[in-house]
Amino acid sequence: MAKVLIATDGSDSSTAAAVKALELLGRSHQFWILEAVHVPVPLAVGSVGGGVPYALPPSPELLLEASQGVMVEAEADVAALSRRLGVKARQVAEAGAAVDVIRRVVEEDRIDLVVVGSHGKGLASRVVLGSVSHDVLKDLPCAVLVVPVGS
């Protein structure tokens, strides 16, 4: 029995990747379902004499409110995916860069296989935005299954 981490971003393509992975692997494994969350930093914008704009750092209360809303949504996504897949899984929703959160869980829980979807972005998008599936492939100490969109 392998330890399998299914990384999701809540999108339809990552759900499709998870479904495909279960078709290939079967259900006789230990599963983790993980969503790494980027917490937006809300800024207060104002202007000074002459209309020069500036941004104020958010208050701790505003940061907490923003992060709680995003985390509640991520936890709901992870729970919904677990139900959709029909597997009992350890459900993880954490704030941070996807690759960093995935790597930490892989190392702490000694994961054998990570499943990620690939959005099929073109080269320009990958150069500008990066690619979680690409970074996971080169950075993790375990096997990785990348499921392309539409497979």
Image: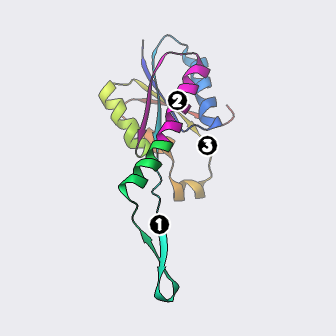
Between 89 and 57, the residue placed more toward the observer is 57
The answer for how far apart the CA atoms under marks 3 and 2 are is: 19 Å
Q: Secondary structure at mark 1?
A: strand
Q: Where is residue 130 drawn, in percent x and y?
A: 50, 52
Instruction: Give the prevailing secondary structure in the magenta stretch.
Output: helix
Bin the neighbour count of mark 1 within 10 Å (Cα to Cα): few under 14, some 14-19, many 20 and up.
Answer: few
Residue where numbered disc 2 is placed: 78
Residue 35 is tagged as none
The part of the chain drawn in magenta is 70-95
Q: Earlier in the sequence, mark 1 or mark 3?
A: 1
Q: For residue 26, which quarter of the picture?
A: top right
In percent of width and height, residue 65 lies at: 45, 48
Judge the density around disc 3: few (<14), some (14-19), many (≥20) Cα neighbours within 10 Å: some
The amino acid marked with disc number 1 is Ala
Name the residue carrying label 1. Answer: 44
Q: In terms of image quadrants, where is residue 36?
A: top left
Foreground residue among 150 and 73: 73
Check the image and report above or below for 41 versus 138. Answer: below
Instruction: Say if mark 1 contacts mark 2, CB within 8 Å.
Output: no
Q: Are marks 1 and 3 in contact (CB under 8 Å)?
A: no
Q: Is residue 86 left or right of residue 6?
A: right
Q: Any magenta on residue 75?
A: yes
Among all residues in the image, which is located at the extreme bottom?
Answer: 50
Write down the residue under mark 3: 119
